[in-house]
Image: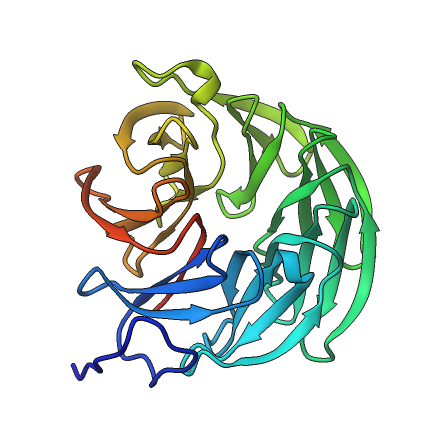
Amino acid sequence: MKRYLLPLLLAGALPATAEEIWVTNEKDDTVSVIDVATLEVIRTIPTGERPRGVTFSKDYSRVYICASDSDTVQVMDPDTGEILHNLPSGEDPEQFVLHPNDRHLYIANEDDAITTVVDTETRSVIAQIDVGIEPEGMAVSPDGKIAITTSETTNMAHWIDTESQQLFANTLVDARPRHAEFVKHGQELWVSAEIGGTISVFDVATQAEKAKIRFEVKGVHPDRVQPVGFELTGDEKTAFVALGPSNHVAVVNADTYQVEDYILVGRRVWHMAFNTDKSLLFTTNGVSGDVTVIDVAKRKPIKTIKVGRFPWGAALRP
């Protein structure tokens, strides 16, 4: 496979030829691009202020970046690193999710207690939905019918009908919910609670809580065990949960909701992304400014990759 030698810091770049993990660095205002084959940073691309959430369009021709302190979502050409345009996002966008229609972005506006829905084609706001205080986590169901916003201070998951853009339910979770995902083909919703130290599992059909996942890391004070981002394997049998300042990732049986293992990673682990075949998991470690690469089958770290200051979000580009 042909490869290009690229400087570590540049606004543009030649087309990518390898599988990549994109990592936002919120203190450096950059994205680090990791080559999955070599496990090395091959590009560092400038962004707006305090980049956090990051996701790709379905065809990977565009990358969306929440530039939180710039109050915008930036749309970048991932081949060149060029910012194509900005989208109206509302104030302080933190996390977002792209609807399965590949067109509508649902954005959590932490300072405004709203969820903003943006049409990426017309570059216009099509709805602003009042939610709880300090919204952060965003998820959308596989069929695209339901979007979820979690509010950190209200301690709720807010259920949004994506056709009417209206709330139809609110469910309590533990303190400071951070991340949400639909799992089991959209039958369950998982919500992590950073201060509560738990993941709440909801039945999507009834919005009723059906399980609670708790964590206990040997030798680590419970106050430091703070679940934030999580990812599930392709068969949705196993979940990997970032536990913040405990500096560990939990391995959870997604059928029994029991913790099977803990993996030591870098300092204050935030979010994660798999490579294409999900044999490797990449964790963003905010305080240590690096990414830990985990061998999924062996459940062991195999490499630490230095990136920018306070890496936050991560996304795969196949």
Q: Is residue 17 left or right of residue 101?
A: left
Q: Position of residue 269 (x, y in %)?
A: 39, 38
Residue at 61% over, 33% down: 177
For the residue pair 203 and 228, the one nearer the viewer reads as: 228
Image position of 142 with respect to 260: above or below: below
Q: Is residue 244 left or right of residue 277?
A: right
Q: Position of residue 169 (x, y in %)?
A: 78, 37
> How many labels, in total?
0
In the rendered image, which quarter contains the N terminus? Answer: bottom left
Q: Position of residue 176 (x, y in %)?
A: 62, 29
Q: Position of residue 270 (x, y in %)?
A: 44, 41
Q: Is residue 257 left or right of residue 93?
A: left
Residue at 35% over, 23% down: 259
Image position of 254 with respect to 314: above or below: above
Q: Visible in this render: residue 258?
A: yes
Colour mapping used in the image: rainbow
Residue at 50% over, 61% down: 29
Q: Visible in this render: residue 145?
A: no
In the rendered image, which quarter contains the C terminus? Answer: bottom left
Residue 144's quadrant in the figure?
bottom right
For the residue pair 96 and 147, the one nearer the viewer reads as: 96
Residue at 55% over, 45% down: 182
Residue 100's quadrant in the figure?
bottom right
